[in-house]
Image (cartoon, rainbow, N blue to C red):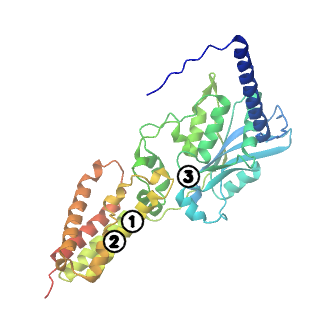
Amino acid sequence: MLNETLQSPPTGASIYQKRYFCGFVAGLFLWALCSNAAENQPDLDLPALSPNVKISLVTCSPGDELYTAFGHSAIRILDPGLGFDRLYNFGTFDMSVGNFYLRFARGDLLYQLSVDQGEADIEEHGALGQGVTEARLNLTPEQRQNLFVALETNLTPENRFYRYDFLLDNCSTRVRDVFERIIGVPVADKSVSGLTFRQMLDFYLERIPWIRFGIYLLLGAKVDRVVTPREACFLPANLESAICQTKVSDTAFAQTPVLLFAARPLPRIPRALDPEVVFSVVLVAWIGLWALRRGRASRAISALVYIVFGFTGLFLVVLAANTLHWEAYQNWNVAWLVPTHLVAGIGLLFVPANKVLILRLYLFLAMVEGLLFMVSSPWLPQQFHPAIYPLVILLLWRTVIELRRKVTP
């Protein structure tokens, strides 16, 4: 129970003393904050851009290497008056950092803003066969200077690093964000409607089908939501489209992009070597060979199939549990790559299913679960790669073989 204590009202003099004291403390606090902010604010001492400065968005088309598979965006500031040509790139990473691949998988790898000589960098991309376009930005002198200051401030050692996010915070979205801060209006590609992240990625992955298959396995249901026009700018080509659609006070934000280098055709493996074709051919040939051998099958092969499926599923679960990449969460691929298949496979190596009731029961449940997945997969909240279906049929076939296997006494 709370006790209320009665006190006599304070006198006028004590009220003024308390107000003066509180004001004095608040003043000291604000002074300390301002002093600390001033200490942390880098003293850049930047020059004023000349009137004939050209600021543009440079967009590179996809390249042959995996890290260039989706293209690239950068901001170019070309100022002949000051004698520099700077290309600001938010997609730089250091492969010499310790545990690079492990940190990338965990999602705590830091990317950074870097700056290169504009003409030289553009020519390098062109020499590698990437298409390069440049869209000049229609900015006021004040906006041009503010953009220059923002980029140089972001370039300081304490500001240049950021935690990379494959879809929501990358070299393209960072450019979008700095544009929005300068012009004060959203930058969005309104031509994108009803597409998911996975569907937008498919256009770039079609020419590298085995990489596409691996990415389909790694990415969960969260990438199957519809992308907003602003989020669509995670791809450089869509960012370029977005700035061409954006208007600032009824004025176009960007001019029509100019082609600096034409893109060379990128190689693609023959479609006969696509995963869905290869797995289907292997499945049919394997079943045909089994039939020619009059149904004789190795239990060790069935065990190996279960072990591979289970180990892959376990990898997906461990990855999702230990990564900051939200794209790996809620992965329905574990509905057919069941981690416990690893234990069943190891069991099959040593004993036939008909000799151990719990193993036989597990294989029966695995068969039912696999059939349910095949039937229900079109309605699950995740899009699956077509190559998985021959693999599921393979698992079901080997399961039936082991359930029907006759064990000699």
Image quarter (top left, top right, bottom left or bottom right) of the N terminus: top left
Judge the density around disc 1: few (<14), some (14-19), many (≥20) Cα neighbours within 10 Å: some
Q: Are marks 1 and 3 in contact (CB under 8 Å)?
A: no
Mark 3 or mark 1, which is nearer the start of the sequence? 3
**Residue 178, disc:** none
Which numbered disc, 2 or 3, marks the residue closer to the eye? Answer: 2
Q: Mark 1 points at which residue?
A: 314
Callout 2: SS: helix
Can residue 288 be seen at all in this image of the molecule?
A: yes
Callout 3: SS: loop
Q: Do the residues labelled 2 and 1 touch (CB within 8 Å)?
A: yes
44 to 67, vertically: above or below: above
Q: What amino acid does circle 3 point to?
A: Phe
Question: Could you tell me how far apart the alpha carbons at marks 2 and 1 are, in whole angstroms?
Answer: 8 Å
Going 55% across and 46% down the picture, which residue do you hit?
Answer: 235
Q: Where is residue 332 in the image (x, y as percent from the top left)?
A: 35, 55
162 to 274, vertically: above or below: above
Q: Where is residue 216 in the image (x, y as percent from the top left)?
A: 42, 57
Q: Name the residue under label 3.
A: 70
Q: What amino acid does circle 2 point to?
A: Leu
Give residue 48's quadrant in the image.
Answer: top right
Judge the density around disc 3: few (<14), some (14-19), many (≥20) Cα neighbours within 10 Å: many
Question: Could you tell me how far apart the alpha carbons at marks 1 and 3 are, in whole angstroms?
Answer: 29 Å
158 to 244, vertically: above or below: below
Q: Which of 391 and 6 is in front in this view?
A: 6
Q: Name the residue under label 2.
A: 342
